[in-house]
Image (cartoon, rainbow, N blue to C red):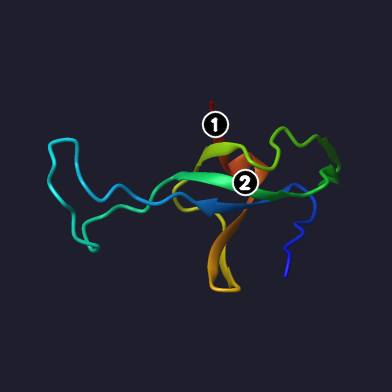
Amino acid sequence: MKIRPLGDRVVIKRLEAEETTKSGIVLPGSAKERPQEAEIVAVGPGGVIDGKEVKMEVKVGDKVLFSKYSGTEVKMDGEEYTIIRQNDILAVVE
């Protein structure tokens, strides 16, 4: 099954959180913070949103940083994805 976002929405898949600190301490599952870095899986077409022309500035495969509490989490085929608006993306990691 594929997800096709509408408007200025983007489907992302969070990257795995670090399990050890730089000093080598292994973190238990409850102590790990959810990562704000993700890979883009699907991109909406953009277009006119709320009377403004929206051009999509990201593409599938980009690694991005996004707002901590943004988006809607969905689970499909055993995988977890988050659907967010393009303006919730803070930066593209190069």
Q: Tell me: residue 85, above or below residue 1.
A: above
Residue for point 77% across, 49% down: 44
| Label 2 environment density (alpha carbons within 10 Å; few <14, some 14–19, many ≥20) | many
Tell me how far mark 2 sits from mark 1, CA to CA.
12 Å
* Mark identifier at residue 75: none
* Tag 1 residue: 91
The quadrant holding residue 1 is bottom right
The quadrant holding residue 2 is bottom right
Give the residue type at disc 2.
Ile
Residue for point 76% across, 37% down: 56
Residue 62: image location, x then y, percent: 61, 37
63 sits to left or right of 46: left
Q: Nearer the viewer, residue 81 or 51?
A: 81
Q: Tell me: residue 22, above or below residue 19.
A: above
Residue for point 62% across, 46% down: 40
Residue for point 58% across, 68% down: 74
Residue 91: image location, x then y, percent: 54, 31
Q: Secondary structure at mark 1?
A: strand
Give the residue type at disc 1.
Ala
Of circles 2 and 1, the one toward us is 2
Mark 2 or mark 1: whose residue is earlier in sequence: 2
Q: Secondary structure at mark 2?
A: strand
* Tag 2 residue: 40
What is the residue that sits farthest to the top in this orientation? 94
Q: Tell me: residue 50, above or below residue 57.
A: below
